[in-house]
Amino acid sequence: MKSANRDLLVLSKKAALDPSQLEQEVAQLHQILFHTETLRNFCIVTELIDINRYKIINKPHKLERFIREHSLKPFQFIFNKN
């Protein structure tokens, strides 16, 4: 697993963290996020609304293929199901 440059806001109940404790917290957060921030998981929780063709694409494999191969045209929206 490669270390990534991330902008993370780490909140703690303690007034100040030791730099080694902070590094450990960031490493643990990176490990959790590395496995959850995948294209497959992104496609499961989003859908594509295409106003041009009056379609909603919500199947993960079709959405994944669309994201990899196409760029969004006018009136195509990626929508989070949350």
Image: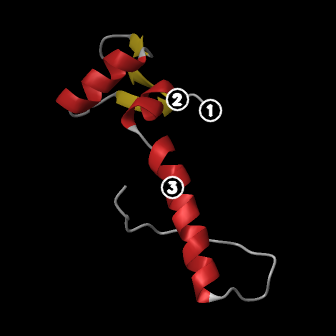
Q: Which mark is residue 7?
A: none
Provide the secondary structure element on which disc 3 rests.
helix
Mark 3 residue type: Gln
Cα–Cα gap, marks 2 and 3? 21 Å
- Label 2 or label 3, whichever lies nearer to me, is 3
Point out the tag, 2 or 3, that comes first from the N-terminus: 3
Q: Residue 47 vs residue 71: left or right? A: right
Depth check: give the residue in front, 70 or 30: 30
What is the quadrant of residue 53 in the picture? top left
Residue 50 image offset from top left, x and y in percent: 35, 19
The label shown at residue 45 is 2
Q: Secondary structure at mark 2?
A: loop
Taking the image as drawn, is residue 9 in sight? no
Asked where in the image residue 49 lies, by quadrant, the reply is: top left
Residue at 81%, 76% in the rendered image: 13
The residue type indicated by label 2 comes to Val
Q: Are marks 3 and 1 in contact (CB under 8 Å)?
A: no
Image quadrant in which you'd find residue 42: top left
Which residue is the site of mark 3? 31
Q: Residues within 10 Å of mark 3 (few under 14, many from 20)?
A: some
Which residue is found at the position 48% from the left and 25% from the top? 44
How busy is the neighbourhood of tag 2: few (under 14 within 10 Å), some, or many (20 plus)?
some
Name of the residue lying farthest toward the left: 69
Q: Quadrant of the C terminus?
A: top right
Tell me which label, 1 or 2, sits earlier in the chain.
Answer: 2
Residue at the spot of label 1: 82
